[in-house]
Amino acid sequence: MSNKNNTLQKRPQRITIRDVAKLAGVSPATVSKVLNDAPHVSQESRQRVMSAVAKLDFRPNSIARSLKSRRTLTIGLITDDLEGVFTTSMMRGVEDVTSSRGFSVFLCNSYGNADKERAHLQLLLDKQVDGVILLSGYKVRERGAPALDLGSIPVVYLYQYTRDINVPCIVPDDFGGAEIGTNHLISLGRKRIGLINGPYHYEATHHRLEGYKSAIENAGISYDPSLVRSGKWYEDAGYMMAKDLMSMDNPPDALFCCSDSLAAGAIRALCELDIRVPDDIPVVGFDNRPFAAHHVPPLTTVALPLYEMGRMAGEMIVSAILGPTPEPGIHKVPCYLVRRESCGVLKASYNSVRDETGSYS
Amino acid sequence: MSNKNNTLQKRPQRITIRDVAKLAGVSPATVSKVLNDAPHVSQESRQRVMSAVAKLDFRPNSIARSLKSRRTLTIGLITDDLEGVFTTSMMRGVEDVTSSRGFSVFLCNSYGNADKERAHLQLLLDKQVDGVILLSGYKVRERGAPALDLGSIPVVYLYQYTRDINVPCIVPDDFGGAEIGTNHLISLGRKRIGLINGPYHYEATHHRLEGYKSAIENAGISYDPSLVRSGKWYEDAGYMMAKDLMSMDNPPDALFCCSDSLAAGAIRALCELDIRVPDDIPVVGFDNRPFAAHHVPPLTTVALPLYEMGRMAGEMIVSAILGPTPEPGIHKVPCYLVRRESCGVLKASYNSVRDETGSYS
DNA sequence: CTGAAAGCGCTAACAA
DNA sequence: TTGTTAGCGCTTTCAG
């Protein structure tokens, strides 16, 4: 039974390259060439094909094209935590870049579960994706490789350190970020800068400590380990560590906190101690979380370049697919300072930041 | 292996159904039948095929399958605002459901721009998606239809009212949610409940007002319009409206705010006026934003069922594709109350909510 | 410059 | 029950 008979209800037969060929009075091969900007087509044929395409509103079927060309112009994006606080900015970066290059992205959420990751990867492979981005909310990833062997399909790690050194891996420049934050406090004339850091099982914690030291020492201040604290990333931990630091005989004259939550907790502690921010103690945070702009006082903070990281991951995966092959290994994306009132009064308007306490108007 | 820039690199030949057939000593058609659990295959052939599949680690090529079957088991998810505060929960719901049904989802971000939406839809059509979900962060959508005619491809609207009544449209039950919030305050013995609402160009605003009225009147309290305020959704607006309400000769004895931001602003105002929350004035918010759990005091709030809405959208689109055809028109998903301290002391632990001020440990 | 022909990997009639 | 055949819609030699 020919399916010309049942064109009506189910899936109306779409226009094919043959229809275009017929209307233009050329062969399907010629239409294909025109569609792909291939050479060796007369101006005349090209014109006729183009107008036939326009007239029929023809669009080539990507599936058929992919089957032949073995390219789907499709990538998979697997995230550990779709609702993670850092995830969407990176996703947006990936999506912007890849879609501008004509790629589509399959969204997969693994919940950090290896079985789910494997299942998603399998499906992606079946669907012949051209590449995969593995995005993590900076969780510690035990595994150094994807949960499934991807064969020759390129992979890029986003916000996730890995032991697999043959693959590009995009992370923030935590060292540089810590330098920037510390230097800002130094530029305010502070000499005893307390560091409120995260737990040491995070890579970032070590890099940020080193960046802090580097800035301190470059300023000719000697590193004093008694000014350094480490704990969870949460608000409460910041509160505790700040109280602890301020109770020293020779307390710090500024606080650099390695997350905005820590900074919020620290400021709460300072508040309770009747220490004014920023007049007595300026405070710098890290991350540039949306709430930082609405904190009281608004937080000066070292911004994580999440969107840029996402863009870079997108560019790298596209590059790995279309060439040239990107450099494998760690790629650090610079952090930048966002100045707000927790480090001194600003005259102009703040850096514009999405309104976190209500983003719909 | 040379590879010029922008030259598509082809990947090595994968194992095909013919390889399996050869190894199993049967025809490709038989392999296909086994793979698709079709009848009329001997137990013997089935066994041999299965073991050949296992031995070769064969996986059918979805692209080839799709070309033939005209089904891609793929849907498109277009969001107005990938970084919107309500977006990811819904996305997660969609992803959970669709992936459990064997579908993959293409993620597209339109930035609320019709041209971008059109371009994405075009690409999705080219890639032969089986269905599309249009997700909005509850922005007002001027257009009542997708930016591109999708022909016979099913569409579901998520968190977005539309004039297109032939399509399923999933929204929260704002009316019911407002009833729940208001009733909670009534159950606390309050009689003059102030309503701090959003702007009237949102559908939700009207529904919530009606829900409030309904609850009030069902409780035998007569509706007093002087207790109702409307303004932007933001914190500042909540502050202003609360101040205004509390300056009345006969001020409210409770406040129902139609967003958590409004509630935060209202509480700030009450604080300034030395009015205690919840003892003098209990306050209920709306949305159950992550910060609500960490507010001081933690906010009792009417939760938007975002994840459930996402799941429902996923179920509907799958249903529209595989049958049975889902009911078109508006589907309201019930809101629910989350009790925290802004309405009275709680003995037990709070409802568990993701930690918003630092979700990584 | 153009088009006929041969597939990409899989499915589905239809014969055997 | 099985295998043969004929495509899905497009690309790509390779003769003409």
Image (cartoon, coloured by chain):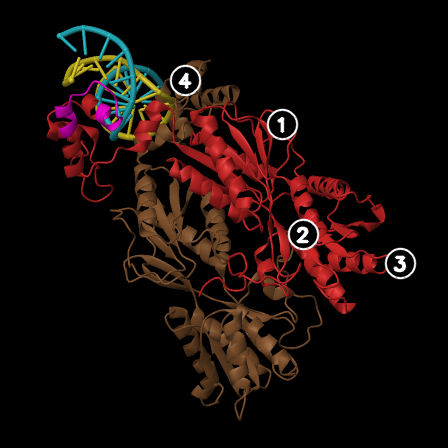
Chain colours: A red, B brown, C yellow, D cyan
Q: Residues within 10 Å of mark 2 (few under 14, many from 20)?
A: many
Residue A38 forms part of the magenta stretch: yes
Q: Are marks 1 and 2 on the same chain?
A: yes
Q: Amino acid at mark 3?
A: Asp
From the viewer's perspective, is A50 left or right of B112? left
Q: What numbered label is drawn on residue B21?
A: 4
Residue B345 forms part of the magenta stretch: no
The reply to whether the C-beta atoms of the residues labelled 1 and 3 are less than 8 Å apart is: no
Q: Is residue A60 above or below residue B275?
A: above
The reply to whether the C-beta atoms of the residues labelled 3 and 4 are less than 8 Å apart is: no
- Residue at 51% x, 54% y: name it: B89
In the image, the segment drawn in magenta is: A32-47
From the viewer's perspective, is B199 left or right of B189? left
B8 vs B97, nearest the viewer: B8
Tell me the SS state at disc 2.
loop
Q: Amino acid at mark 1?
A: Asp
Residue highlighted by disc 3: A249
Gap in angstroms between the C-alphas marked 1 and 3: 47 Å
For marks 1 and 3, the one nearer the N-term is: 1
- Residue at 62% x, 26% y: name it: A165
Q: Amino acid at mark 2?
A: Ser
Tell me the SS state at disc 1.
loop
Q: Residues within 10 Å of mark 3 (few under 14, many from 20)?
A: few
Q: Amino acid at mark 4?
A: Ala
Q: Nearer the viewer, mark 4 or mark 2?
A: 2
A222 vs B260, nearest the viewer: A222
Q: Nearer the viewer, mark 4 or mark 1?
A: 1
Q: Are marks 4 and 1 on the same chain?
A: no
Q: What numbered label is drawn on residue A164?
A: 1
Q: What numbered label is drawn on residue A259?
A: 2
| Corner quadrant of residue B160 | bottom left
Residue B77, position as x, y percentages in the image: 40, 48
